[in-house]
C-alpha cells in the first residue's frame, strides 16, 4: 500500500498505526543516559539540556539596590503620598495641533501648563481642548479658564502659588479658582 494511502487510512482511523521501534537508548533509558546535546535524535529533535535553579546562571541578574540581593524585600515597598507642591507654570501659546505633545509631556511630569489658544484656528483649538480635557481626566487633574481662550491645566498634587498667579496676571491671564 502506498505511503499516502496508508496515512489517510490511519488518519481516518480505519487501520491501526504501525508501531515503530525506537533505538535502545530512548527506550526506558535513565535520564543520565540521554544522548549528548547536539546529537540529533532519529526524529530530528535535539534534546535540551535542563538546569536546576541551583545551577542556573545568574550573571545577567542586576540587584535592585546596590548591596542587595536580586530579590526585592517584600516589606520594603513604600507608598509615598502625593504632596502638593508649588510649581512654575509653563506657558504654551499653541500654534498648531503639534503643540499637544509639548503640553502633554509637561503635564505628565506634574508641571502646571497654561494653554493659550488665541493664535490657532477654532477647529484646531477645539481638538487641542478635547485632547487636554482627556489628559486631565485620565491623570485626575483640573482645568481653570484663564480668560478668553486660555486654560490653566493643573495636575493632581500640584498647586499654583500666589507668585505664579501674579506672574500670569502680568502676562494678561486672569482666572478664578
Image: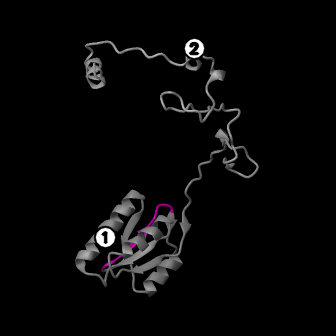
Residue 65 image position (x, y, % from top left)? 70, 51
Task: Name the mark on residue 129.
Answer: 1
Magenta-highlighted residues: 149-157
The residue depicted at 57 percent of the width and 14 percent of the height is: 28
**Residue 163 appears left or right of 2:** right
User: On the image, which quarter does residue 107 sit in?
Assistant: bottom left
| In the image, residue 169 above or below residue 112 | below
Along the line of sight, which residue is nearer the eye, 121 or 89? 121
The residue depicted at 34 percent of the width and 82 percent of the height is: 95
Please identify the residue farthest to the left as the structure is shown: 123
Along the line of sight, which residue is nearer the eye, 97 or 25? 25
**Mark 1 nearby-residue class (10 Å; few <14, some 14–19, many ≥20):** some
State how far apart marks 2 and 1 are (Cα). Answer: 72 Å
Which quarter of the image is occupied by the C terminus?
Answer: bottom left
Along the line of sight, which residue is nearer the eye, 109 or 8? 8
Quickly name the residue at label 2: 28
Amino acid at each position: 500500500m502506498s505511503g499516502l494511502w496508508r496515512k489517510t487510512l490511519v488518519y481516518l482511523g480505519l487501520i491501526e498505526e504501525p508501531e515503530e521501534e525506537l533505538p535502545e537508548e530512548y527506550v526506558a533509558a535513565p535520564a543520565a543516559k540521554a544522548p549528548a546535546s547536539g546529537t540529533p535524535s532519529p526524529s530530528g529533535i535535539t534534546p535540551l539540556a535542563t538546569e536546576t535553579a541551583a545551577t542556573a546562571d545568574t550573571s545577567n541578574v542586576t540587584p535592585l539596590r546596590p548591596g542587595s540581593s536580586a530579590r526585592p524585600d517584600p516589606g520594603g515597598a513604600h507608598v509615598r503620598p502625593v504632596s502638593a507642591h508649588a510649581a512654575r507654570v509653563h506657558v504654551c501659546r499653541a500654534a498648531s495641533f503639534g503643540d499637544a505633545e509639548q503640553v502633554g509631556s509637561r503635564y505628565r511630569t506634574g508641571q502646571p501648563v497654561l494653554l493659550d489658544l488665541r493664535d490657532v484656528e477654532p477647529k484646531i483649538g477645539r481638538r487641542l481642548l478635547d485632547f487636554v480635557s482627556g489628559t486631565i481626566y485620565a491623570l485626575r487633574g483640573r482645568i481653570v479658564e484663564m480668560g478668553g481662550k486660555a486654560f490653566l491645566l493643573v495636575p493632581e498634587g500640584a498647586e499654583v502659588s500666589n507668585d505664579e498667579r501674579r506672574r500670569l496676571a502680568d502676562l494678561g491671564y486672569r482666572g478664578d479658582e
